[in-house]
Image: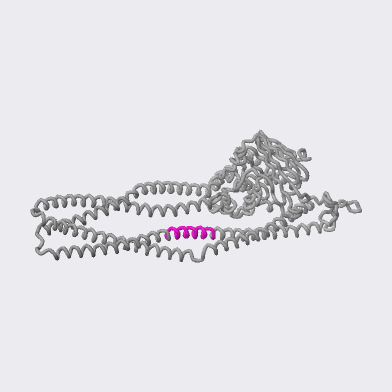
Amino acid sequence: MKSLEMNQINIEAENLGGLAGKTKIKIEPGINIIEAPNAAGKTSIVGAFTLSVLSPKEASQHAHILHSEEARGSVKLSFDDQKIERTIQRKDKGKDVEIVGGSVASGDELGLIRRYAVADEHNPVLVKVRAGDNLKEVLTEYSGVEELRSEQKKLIGEKDELQEKLKQGNEKLKKIDFLKKDLKNKEKRLDELESEKKKIREREKKPSEGEGEAKLVELEGEIARTETDLKSIAESIKTAESLIKSRNERLKAIEQRAAGGIEDTIKEIEGKEDEIKGLEKEKLELDRKYSLKSSELAHLRFIVSSAPAYAVPSEDKLAALISDEEQLIVCPICDHKTKYGQIKAKQQKTDEEVKEISKQKSDLEQKINKFNRKISELNAKKTEKDSLETEKSRILHELASHEKMHSKKKEDIKALEARLTELTASRDKMLKKRKEVASDVEKEKIKLEKEMAVVSSGIDRMKNELKLLESASADLNKIEKKNENIDQRIKELTSEIEERENGIVRIFNTEIKQIYEKMGFKKVDELKLDKKFDLNVVRKSKAGAGYADMHSVKSLSKTEREVAGLILLLSGYRAFKVADKYPLFIVDEISFMDPERLKEFINHIKETAQAIILTTIPGREIVLPGVTHIPLAEVRR
């Protein structure tokens, strides 16, 4: 989705939360404050925005967004030339729901927007901050670090392979230099031998003797070349046997390492995924129970806190004493009369049920996370086995090539041995026919021809080897370039991983100190997010200057804790550049802050997003330029 440069957002919600029917609101750039009494629909408006940034897989976790008595609800957003509509509806009149329609973003962007741009009671970061829990999982889930680490690991493996190829290439270059030097010496020696041969020919006097000598010399030369070729082929056979042996050993190692088979790993992954589906189904049911019980608890708390207003007057017309357990209370919704003591008892029981469900949800989430980590390990194992299978195929191909070369050389050496036997027999027969001992010239010439044959054969062999090695230089340049590119990418990935892991920490620790000083939180010396993603509270120690006491986040006041959570969302908002995708920052219920601190907070965040949406009860006037007050009662119909 392109970056949103909006002038105005129009939102229309229907049958969401406590808002039966349709509600239309215009959101202007700047600060928008939605005003309504408690339980009048402010959170439902925030829920409508949340629905527009939910991914379909999260639908069942937010069934509470749909009005309890309706089968279908929707939210429509329009800004500039874009229009987005999403609906949430029950399946076959049951409790399960599904989301249909487009959203403001796709993929992990939805998770980023939900996590860092919508601060409601279900925001996972705020929930963790309020509980004082470790924040690593919720802050890094959509960071993409695991994908970057996987790419980095793969590149490091490629680099190791390239280093080995570079080593082999450099050895080939050294061999080329050695061969060129040796070839030059042999060519020089061949020229010397040709010169000596020319001198010997000049010394020959008798044509008949010269003819016999020439044939014998020719035989000796061919014998010498054949013997040299046999030696060369024997070395090639030895090399091929060595290569075949090494490839067989590597195949054996791969078979041992890959024992167990990739099929078992895939089955295990599928089994874990099935278990996760079962756990997630349990969690959905708990979420539903939690939502219902939370709503019931809020209703009971409202009745208890407002009990004097709904007490049934006694017959003697004296004011009802709310401390009387037998005092009748009229329900503000259904007009049903219930004893005050029964309401209090039901509130206590419901509160315990909500806590128990919350604990069950936490246990299920831990199990699901444990299974997800196991699946990641199994996927890594599967990837390694895929790599081993690829290497196995390559080695089998090389092995077949080496065996073919070995077979060919065996045939060549057999043919040369037969030819050598034939040449030796011809030479012996010729020598036997000669009655006179070869002259000194003949001996010298034979010796010369032998050396020339050996030198000439060596030159041919070196030229052939140089021809095969000449491509090594060009290949080496390509490998070096690829190695440099991989090095650069590994450095970029290392930097990006570090930035993604530490970006939120760095931004939060800078901003929280500034905002706490601006808002006048005197009791907290420092609030710091460490590298392990634990939120630490440092207060000045009574022991004296230079000392400090570490405290839990739970030691903070509600206002201090909520401000810390909101600044943490803003830090993620900036670190993951949520503002480039959907420039809204929404805070559900700001009544926990006094007006002066609220002004400081708004001034701090107003540059973050083009539109800031806050909800509050009526009567909390904010005197700031560019504030748009939206009374909810006036926009509902």
Q: Position of residue 600 (x, y in %)?
A: 63, 39
Image position, residue 615 (x, y; %): 70, 42
Secondary structure, magenta segment, majority class: helix
Q: Based on the displayed image, in which of its 4 quarters is residue 366 positioned?
A: bottom right
Q: Could you tell me if residue 538 is visible in this image?
A: no
Relative to 306, is 135 on the left or the right? left
Between residue 70 and residue 140, name the one nearer to us.
Answer: 70
Horizontal side of residue 632 vs 529, given as left or right: right
> Which quarter of the rendered picture does the N terminus lie within?
top right
Name the residue located 9 percent from the left edge and 63 percent from the top edge: 436
Task: Identify the image quadrant of residue 358.
Answer: bottom right
In the current view of this chain or complex, which residue is farthest to the right? 315
Q: Name the residue nearer the viewer: 436 or 228.
A: 436
Q: Is residue 250 above or below residue 494?
A: below
Q: Is residue 380 magenta?
A: yes
Q: Tell whether position 571 is magenta.
A: no
Foreground of the two, 13 or 541: 13
Q: Position of residue 276 (x, y in %)?
A: 63, 60
Q: For the image shown, how many numbered marks are present on the structure?
A: 0
Q: Report the magenta residues as a range.
A: 378-395
Is 274 positioned to the left or the right of 88 in the image? left
